Amino acid sequence: MSRRPLLALLPTLIGTLLCAPATQAQDQVLNIYSARHYQTDEALYANFTKATGIKINRLDGKEDELVERIRNEGTASPADLLITVDAARLEVADALGLFQPVKSKLLEERVPAGLRTPTWVAFSTRARVIVYNKVALKREAVQNYADLATLALKGQVCMRSGSHPYNLSLGAAMIAHEGEARTEAWARGLVANFARSPKGGDTDQIKAVAAGECGVTISNTYYLVRMMRSTNAQDQQAINAVGIVWPNQASWGTHVNVSGAGVLKHAPHREAALKFMEYLASDEAQAYFANGNNEWPVVKGAAVANKELSALGSFKPDALPIGELAKTTVQAQKLFDRAGWK
Ligand code: FE
């Protein structure tokens, strides 16, 4: 073929390329099953559609229900992607074989290796920190997760359920670093120190600590930052009454967890799903995690315009790869059950 006919075709080619997004907008869809419970995520989805023309159908639900649904739907499942929070939950889906391998150069470049597995990828991180009542306790008394299980804190500890993934992942990290026996002893000590039976979420524990119902708890960081940014007077009062400690700075570091996503094995729109995964690692989406839900971006250098989140400062995070941590969450559940952490 000579050059001339090709050149003659150029205007047509350019015309086709320019028209492409409009056509795709009608044809391309992405079906997301989401167990993230943050309203601020709306902007994430809307901007993806704006940028790619791919329409998102989202089914929101509880993790267990979504996983059960994907299993029941089997090869006929319309779901392309599962997005959820906490490595423990991602591991449940992965162990059931619901994901397919993710292959993306872009994700490999942008997401640190310790925050990816062959099947799912983390897009934001949060830390599980110690929160104490500044009047009731001295900061020095609550420097490590282990401190909460010592006799000195009898009747002072409030915690959410031991079956909750946030605590299971913390238990998993502890098992990886200290072994099962020590982790079980810790759980028993913790339960013995409870001021009340586990109830409510992390925010409820923070409020109970602030009100003096208990002296100390463990919470994910974004709940604290949310309260810091709240204009509600009671939230402000509560957050001012508590101190925040990065646990285990002299040992294995503070437990860090993630939110993440994986492409489902029978995804009808595999390419769109991968595109969405890559979008979640874009500067724009990364900024949403930070500014919308007060989580840290996983991509180095992603902008954080959230002064309360920045004010938390830096700390030594647990260096355990997230995929490795996820593997011991089932063990953690058995061990917490034995320890009576309901
Ligand atoms: Fe949460």
Image: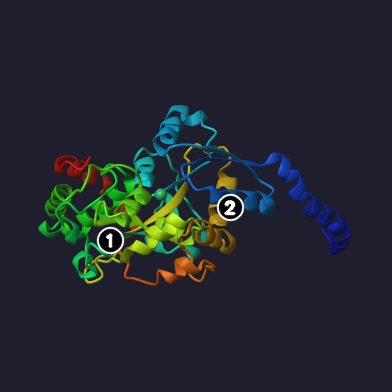
Residue 87 or 79: which is nearer the viewer? 87
Tell me how far mark 2 sits from mark 1, CA to CA. Answer: 34 Å
Query: Which amino acid type corresponds to the residue marked 1 in the rendered image?
Result: Tyr
Q: Is residue 222 left or right of residue 149?
A: right
Q: At x 24% / y 53%, what residue is drawn? A: 214
Q: At x 43% / y 55%, what residue is drawn? A: 234
Q: Up-down: is 186 above or below 246?
A: above
Query: Which amino acid type corresponds to the residue marked 2 in the rendered image?
Result: Leu
Where is residue 329 drawn, in percent x and y?
27, 47
Task: Identify the residue under disc 1.
Answer: 132
Quadrant in the picture for residue 51: bottom right
Q: At x 51% / y 71%, what residue is drawn? A: 301
Marks 2, 1: nearer the viewer: 1
Q: Secondary structure at mark 2?
A: helix
Q: Quadrant of the C terminus?
A: top left
Q: Secondary structure at mark 1?
A: strand
Where is residue 79 drawn, in percent x and y?
52, 36
Can residue 163 be seen at all in this image of the molecule?
yes
Task: Identify the residue under disc 2.
Answer: 44
First in sequence, mark 2 or 1: give its number. 2
